[in-house]
Amino acid sequence: MIMDKFGTEMTELLPEEPDTEELVQEAQESDKKHTRSGMIEGRNAVQEALRAGKTADRLYIQDGLRDPAIGQIVSKVKKQGATVSYVKKQQLDQMSETGRHQGVILLCSAYEYASMEEIFKLAEEKGETPFVFLLDEIEDPHNLGAIIRTANLCGAHGVIIPKHRAVGLTATVVKASAGAVNYTPVVKVTNIAKTIDDLKKRGMWFACADMGGEVMYNCNLTGPIGLVIGNEGSGVSRLVREKCDYIVSVPMKGDIDSLNASVAAGVLAYEIVRQRMLKKD
C-alpha cells in the first residue's frame, strides 16, 4: 500500500509528456510567422529558403563566421544582387524572433521587384508622360510603404530604390503600403545617380527635395519627371543632388525645420499632380 501510494504520488509530480502533434503545430505556426514577416533564421532554414527560390533582400551574418556553409549562403545571396551585412551577435540577438539564428538572418522580399521597362510601359498604357519616385537611402520601412502608397494614389508610374543602405520590400513595407505594391512597380537599382543619368537619356527631368531649394510653386514640375526623396536623417546625397535639374522645397511656417520623408514626398507629389492637371487644361 505504501509503495502504491508513493508511486501514485510520484506519478502526479512528474511532468506530462509533450504532445508531439502540438509541438509540430507550434513549429508550423512559427514557420508561417517568419514567412509572413519575411525573416528567416538559422543556416539550414536560410539554405532551404534560397534553394526554394526565395528572393533575398538582405543577409545578416555574424562577424567572424567564415565556414563553407556560410560561404555558400553568401554566394547565393550575392548572385541575386542582395546586400550582405556582417554585424555583431548582439544585433542579431535583437533582431531574432526565435533566439536560434545561428549567426544567420535572411530578410526576404515580400514581393518581386519590377523592371525599369515596366514603369515606362505603364506610363505608355495610360497615355501619360512618365512620373516616378526615386528614393535615396530610405531606411524606415513605414516611410517606404507610405511613399509607395502615395505614389499609387497620385498616379506615379513607379518607385525606384537602391540595393544598398536602404530598406527593401519587406512585409512591414507591404503592410504600410496598404496594398499599393500590387499596382505600383518598385524597381531596385545598384546606383541612383547612374540611374538618373540613364533616365535623362530617355527624356526625363529630376526634382530633388531639399529644404534649401526653390519653393515648389515656383518650379515647372510638368513633363516626364522624377521626384527624388532623400534619407530620413541626411537627406539626398551630394552626388545625387548634383544630378538633379531642380532643387525644390516645401514652404514651412512652423517652429521645426523639416517634414518626415514620406510626408514631404506626398506634398511635393501632389504639387506635381496639380501642375500636370493645369497643363492639361
Image (tube, grey):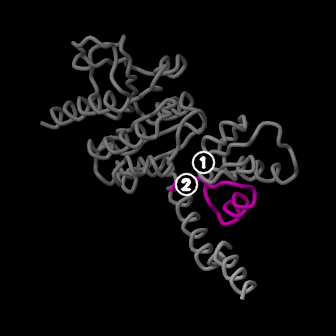
Residue that mark 2 sits on: 38
Q: Residue at x 50, y 49 (%)?
A: 170
Query: As drawn, which residue projects farthest toward the front?
Result: 2
Query: In this picture, is 165 found above or below 248?
Result: below
Q: Residue 57: which numbered mark, if any?
A: 1
Where does the N terminus fall, quadrant-wise?
A: bottom right
Q: Nearer the viewer, residue 187 or 23?
A: 23
Query: As drawn, which residue projects farthest toward the left?
Result: 281
53 to the left or right of 226: right
Query: In this picture, is 156 found above or below 9?
Result: above
Query: In this picture, is 185 found above or below 212?
Result: below
Looking at the image, do the residues carrying marks 1 and 2 touch, with CB atoms under 8 Å apart?
A: yes
Residue flagged by tag 2: what amino acid is it? Gly
Residue 104, given in percent of the width and then of the height, sits at 72, 48
Residue 72, given in percent of the width and then of the height, sits at 81, 53
Residue flagged by tag 1: what amino acid is it? Asp
Q: Residue at x 59, y 39 (%)?
A: 163
Tag 1's secondary structure? Answer: strand
Q: Which residues are magenta?
A: 37-55
Q: Nearer the viewer, residue 11 or 263?
A: 11
Q: Residue at x 87, y 48 (%)?
A: 67
Q: Nearer the viewer, residue 178 or 22?
A: 22
Tag 2's secondary structure? Answer: loop
